[in-house]
Amino acid sequence: MSLLLKNATFIHWDSLHFEQADILVPAVQDAKITLMKAGSAEPDGHKVIDCSGKLVTKSFAVGHHHVYSALARGMPAPPKAPNNFREILEYIWWTLDKSLDEETIRYSALSTAMAAAKAGSTFVIDHHASPNCIEGALDIIADAFDEVGVGHLLCYEVTDRDGQERAEQGLLETARYLEKRQGLVGLHASFTVGPDTLGSAVEIMSEFDAGAHIHLAEDKYDQEHCLHEYYQRVVSRLNEAGILESSKTILVHGLHLDAAERKLLNKKTCWLVQNMESNLKNKVGLFSGNNLGSNIMLGTDGMHSDMLRSAKAAFFTGQIADTINFKTAYQRFRNVHNYLSINNFTGDGENNLVVLDYDSPTEVTKENFTGHFVFGLSANHIRNVISKGRLIVENRKLLTVNEPEVLKEASKQARRLWKKMGR
């Protein structure tokens, strides 16, 4: 059933033009919405939502996520405290991903999709790893996201860190998935991907006209390893391999880049994703978009699923290390839609909307909206969420799944996961 949003203040997400309108929202993927004069006669056969006093705009999307981290919240610390970034990976995340199985992947995905939806995101770009449960893992995640009603662009994190057999399984899972769904070719990072695996990944990119999704210079170790093993910096290595030639390619973090790397990336059509809170947590450095061009978007890196929160972190921390203002913070927040549109990915069309119950003590206009975006708007203001024309959150409650039941089972699965990890 199509939706009719009555008496809305509609904000065009790209121009920030404000318009008082009734909005007809078709329940068809990537359909266009129709703006009608506010107070128009109600056509028959539509569910009507009164949006008087509410702001309606395009919903949000996550530029980089990690479903596999969803059940780590509150997890006991590792027996030995990590002293650096590589030990954080080894003692925490590489221990966790090896312990994942079909059930824990499913409830990680359901939990992530639910949290994203309630925070206003109707599309998630995810980077997944589960070395002991590779085959079919992406289908489990996709099915869970579909169940909640959240669009997705998935990949499996191919790496040599668990041996050649696991790397080959990851490549096979990638090709199998791309044969039937949109997705990317996932790679962990240069320092865990050898020449043969990198070459095979590029071949899959070419075969399926896909981009890569890879962590880039998140920590200094990535550069140090590349210089030691390949006598070049990471951006140069990825460029020579062909990773950077696709506008579908996503490079994640990009903290430790020199001037030459920034200059090269500025000339490319690939995209970088900033994940400020994760960088702070891991003490790996602060992101700077200086001389990197405009192809920068925001992600959560599995820390949470709240893109408004990520945007605030990018803005405030950027006052120290970056050149960022209200306008560029909003632009990076919304760039994920440009990435998806330019590359013809489906699921992020006009009929993905949020209804905001934003009770500001000051007026909200086109001229000051980005100031409200940084200092005012939060996930608490999200009342309704519409995905592909379908109402999935109404009055802050999920309609597509039984949230209490899912969270109860997710908690059970988390305890089982922690036990497998020896926590």
Image (cartoon, helix red, strand yellow):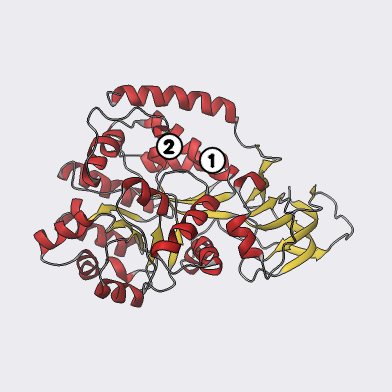
Left or right: 308 with respect to 36? left
Which residue, given by chain and number where applicable, does mark 2 sit on?
70
Name the residue at 85% across, 55% down.
43
Q: Is there CB contact under 8 Å for labels 1 and 2?
A: yes
- For the residue marked with disc 1, what is the amino acid? Ala
In the rendered image, the vertical position of residue 105 relative to residue 361, given as above or below = above
User: Looking at the image, is 121 positioned above or below residue 73?
Assistant: below
Q: Total number of numbered labels?
A: 2
- Given residues 285 and 46, the one toward you in this image is 285
Q: Which residue is mark 1?
A: 115
Quarter of the image where one finds residue 147: top right
Residue 367 image-quadrant placement: bottom right
- x, y (%) of residue 93? 30, 39
**Image spot of residue 163 (x, y percent):** 15, 42
N-term-proximal mark, 1 vs 2 = 2
Q: Does residue 274 appear in the picture of this structure? A: yes
